[in-house]
Image (cartoon, rainbow, N blue to C red):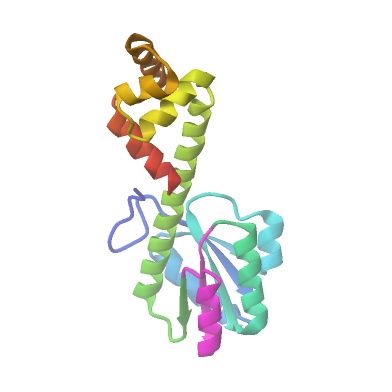
Amino acid sequence: MLGLERNGCASVAPLVRLVEVEDAFQLFLELRQILESDGCQVVTFGSVEELLLQQPGSAPGCMVLCADTLGPEGLDLQALLASQSDLPVILVTSITTARDVVRAMKQGAADFFCEPLDERAILSAVEKAAADHRRKAESRELRQAFELRRASLSPRELEVYEQLVLGSSGEAICERLGLAERTLKHHRSKVMEKLGFRSIVELVRVVEGCKG
């Protein structure tokens, strides 16, 4: 969990990468004040190029792209950011069109705001984006750790593992793999030990979670 409070970004504050696009200085300053006054950690960048050069990092949070007029160029920059990082992108602009909003959301924008700014809505969007990013990072770490443990299984243990996650009964596994019941129990015990699970139910739950 992020540990974010309902009325603010603190406790475990998300890291907001605030990016100015072209002539959006006043909007940039307003957003920075909104975010910092609520306890968010804010790192500022004068352009998308500067952000990519310095690297946005992987700390839980999001990117906020602010532009005076979004337009096709700003939307191209959003697409570029999305291709370079898994951080959610929130767009804030002074002037926009319905077509721009539709394209931005189709390109995966976490949220979209236009002046006049709704401070609470922006802070809520930042909190949600950061929470989503943290969950995805934790899920990715879980999958990576699980894959490392699974790689330690012997070929026979891997066969037993695959049957277990399919929900096959002990009798069916013995028949399919040509194993004696005692041998199956030994392999099943080794599988559970190497993967770090105490029950088949727990194993299946994690496997299904990793698929997501």
x and y percentages locating residue 139 in the rendered image:
44, 45
Which of 28/113 is in front?
113
Q: How many marks?
A: 0
Q: Is residue 80 left or right of residue 34?
A: right
Residue 99's spot in the image, x, y percent?
54, 87
Q: Is residue 141 magenta?
A: no
Magenta extent: 87-110
Give the residue displayed 40% in from the left and 38% down from the top: 207
Relative to 15, say whether 111 is above or below.
below
Q: Quadrant of residue 169?
A: top left
The residue under the point 50% across, 75% down is 105
Residue 194 image point, x, y percent: 43, 20
129 over 95 or under it: above or below: above
Q: Position of residue 197 (x, y in %)?
A: 34, 26
Vertical arrangement, residue 75 with respect to residue 38, above or below? below
Say whether residue 155 is left or right of residue 122. right
